[in-house]
């Protein structure tokens, strides 16, 4: 854990960029507090009290003029704003402005040699799979192909509590991956294809030592299609326990194929539960027969997420996570930025970092798709931020996005992926997903993320079995209030600790968690309900 400064520095407000005409309150500030710019050239007195994470006009801003934070436009004054006045939704709104995508015009240099030398030899204790992938956890997954088999899948998983797994110390748990879809859709097209990618990604995830697939029998995404897509194919010599995927256990010794149960063929609910419990019990010794071993940090695929964000997310936790991402990339690993709706307004910063015009154009195409998609429902992308985000100081989607993309660090954007598409590129990448946390993280995990870093300012309580989720607080008051849920306090940035130092400490925590250190969500058993595949098509 990052040590607190010996003496906490009292910082009233943060001025992020010389161009900015606002500062951000680093704590609750009473009326008449004097705040100044980073270079102390501009100074003003608060006209009114301002809460932690909210913005204060550093100079007069005329109606229609741009409001700048991060050195970028985050909105426009909807009325005159006086110096020292609170700047938020009551006087700042959205507006169109030109963003120059300048594809691949500012591709960053590779990480500095000194940094590469420092981190390239770093390792963690992981589970090396027969597929060549490396896991950070070792679960048995029960994949429910349709909502109709969800209750059965959960009942089987519940049977294998801590007492039932007492003799299997190398197994982290049995998780039921259930959801609310799987039928009522066409058996073709992007929605069906996307759901199949999720199933395949979870079945082949390096944190999963064995899979049992359960369906009702008449659904669109039936057991046969799921197992075929996931590569859980018939094997020639079941008695030899040869792998059907990335482990040595996911097959039925009796029939030689993948372990699947169809309720309509297995005698219904009770019989399927009983059979499923026996199948999982048979798997336990095989899944337990694996040991952690030292593996390079390059095997980490980090999913980055922000939820319950506030005005300090882009000041403390997200930039610190960006430093962590840069260190992981320098070590040869992968960092994923998702939530396309929370890239909108900041996409021009990423297109310039793209390694090619083609990669940058992929991102722009996603933004345009989301504009069309949301318009079908009479919704705009800028309906985000949420009420909680606004209470925490975020005013527009531009502001939220500019802070959110900081999680991706400063290295080159190497690839843009579809939702739940297997992530094979090393370095910094983007995956298409909605901004809602459960489906966003589900997509990254299905794509291969084996650790998740989740920043939050309001206090999100999130887990995502079978992958550990590290919760990073943006401010100290919330961290202390929710200490049982938060793993890391980036709020010390507001007390004088450099972002670079906080990011280095976060990188060390990622390695520790990848090696088996339990996160707060894992200790509390959170993560069974957060498997939420994103469904984009109509329900038929």
Image (cartoon, rainbow, N blue to C red):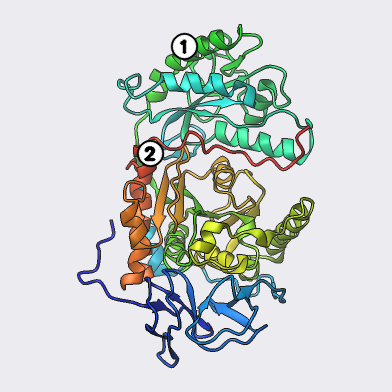
Alpha carbons under labels 2 and 1: distance apart: 26 Å
Residue 442 in picture, x, y percent from top left: 56, 42
Q: Residues within 10 Å of mark 2 (few under 14, many from 20)?
A: many
Residue 93, disc? none
* Residue 165 seen: yes
Residue 522, disc? 2
Give the camera-side residue of 100 and 328: 100
For image coordinates 36% across by 77% down, the residue present is 12
* Residue 118 seen: no
| Disc 1 element | helix
- In the image, residue 295 sits, relative to residue 70, either above or below, namely above
Q: Give the quadrant of the N terminus.
A: bottom left
For image coordinates 44% across by 38% down, the residue present is 135
Mark 2 or mark 1, which is nearer to you? 2
- In the image, residue 447 sits, relative to residue 385, either above or below, namely above
Q: Residues within 10 Å of mark 1 (few under 14, many from 20)?
A: few
Q: How many marks?
A: 2
- Which image quarter: residue 39? bottom left
For image coordinates 55% across by 48% down, the residue present is 437
- In the image, residue 351 sits, relative to residue 22, either above or below, namely above
Left or right, residue 401 beside residue 53 = right
Residue 286 in picture, x, y percent from top left: 41, 20
Give the camera-side residue of 362 and 424: 362
Do the residues bearing badges 2 and 1 touch, measured as CB atoms within 8 Å? no
For image coordinates 21% across by 72% down, the residue present is 7
Left or right, residue 104 beside residue 237 = right
Residue 372 in picture, x, y percent from top left: 78, 56
First in sequence, mark 2 or 1: give its number: 1
| Disc 2 element | helix
Give the farthest residue toward the left.
6
Give the camera-side residue of 247 and 165: 165
The residue singled out by tag 1 in the image is 278
């Amino acid at each position: 854990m990052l040590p607190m400064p010996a003496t906490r520095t009292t910082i009233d407000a943060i001025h992020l960029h010389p161009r900015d005409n606002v500062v951000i309150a680093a704590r609750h500030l009473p009326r008449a507090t004097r705040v100044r710019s980073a270079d102390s050239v501009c100074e003003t007195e608060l006209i009114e009290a301002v809460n932690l994470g909210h913005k204060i006009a550093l100079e007069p801003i005329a109606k229609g003029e741009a409001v700048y934070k991060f050195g970028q436009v985050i909105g426009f004054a909807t009325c005159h704003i006086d110096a020292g006045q609170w700047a938020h939704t009551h006087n700042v709104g959205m507006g169109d402005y030109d963003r120059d995508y300048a594809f691949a015009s500012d591709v960053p240099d590779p990480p500095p040699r000194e940094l590469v030398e420092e981190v390239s030899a770093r390792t963690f204790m992981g589970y090396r799979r027969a597929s060549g992938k490396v896991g950070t956890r070792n679960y048995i997954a029960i994949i429910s192909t349709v909502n109709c088999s969800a209750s059965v899948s959960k009942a089987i998983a519940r049977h294998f509590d801590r007492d039932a797994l007492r003799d299997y110390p190398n197994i982290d748990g049995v998780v039921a991956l259930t959801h609310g879809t799987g039928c009522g859709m066409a058996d073709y097209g992007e929605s069906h294809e996307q759901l199949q990618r999720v199933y395949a990604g979870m079945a082949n995830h390096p944190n999963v030592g064995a899979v049992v697939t359960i369906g009702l029998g008449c659904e669109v995404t039936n057991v046969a299609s799921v197992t075929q897509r996931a590569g859980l194919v018939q094997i020639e010599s079941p008695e030899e326990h040869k792998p059907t995927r990335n482990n040595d256990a996911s097959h039925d010794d009796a029939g030689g194929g993948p372990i699947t149960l169809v309720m309509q063929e297995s005698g219904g609910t009770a019989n399927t539960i009983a059979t499923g419990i026996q199948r999982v019990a048979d798997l336990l010794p095989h899944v337990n027969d694996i040991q952690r071993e030292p593996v390079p940090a390059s095997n980490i695929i980090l999913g980055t997420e922000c939820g319950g964000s506030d005005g300090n997310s882009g000041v403390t936790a997200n930039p610190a996570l960006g430093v962590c991402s840069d260190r992981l990339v320098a070590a040869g690993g992968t960092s994923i930025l998702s939530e396309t709706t929370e890239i909108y307004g900041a996409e021009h910063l990423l297109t310039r970092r793209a390694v090619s015009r083609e990669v940058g154009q992929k991102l722009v195409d996603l933004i345009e798709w989301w504009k069309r998609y949301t318009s079908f429902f009479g919704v705009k992308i800028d309906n985000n931020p949420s009420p909680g985000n606004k209470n925490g100081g975020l005013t527009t989607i531009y502001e939220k996005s500019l802070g959110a993309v900081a999680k991706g660090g400063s290295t080159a954007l190497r690839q843009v992926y579809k939702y739940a598409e297997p992530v094979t590129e090393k370095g910094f990448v983007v995956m298409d997903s909605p901004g809602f946390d459960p489906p966003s993280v589900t997509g990254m995990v299905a794509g291969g993320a084996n650790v998740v870093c989740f920043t939050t300012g309001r206090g999100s309580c999130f887990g995502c079995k079978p992958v550990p989720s590290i919760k990073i607080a943006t401010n100290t008051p919330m961290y202390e209030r929710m200490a049982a849920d938060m793993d890391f306090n980036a709020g010390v940035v507001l007390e004088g600790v450099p972002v670079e130092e906080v990011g280095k400490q976060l990188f060390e925590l990622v390695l520790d968690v990848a090696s088996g250190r339990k996160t707060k969500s894992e200790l509390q058993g959170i993560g069974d309900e957060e498997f939420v595949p994103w469904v984009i098509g109509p329900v038929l």
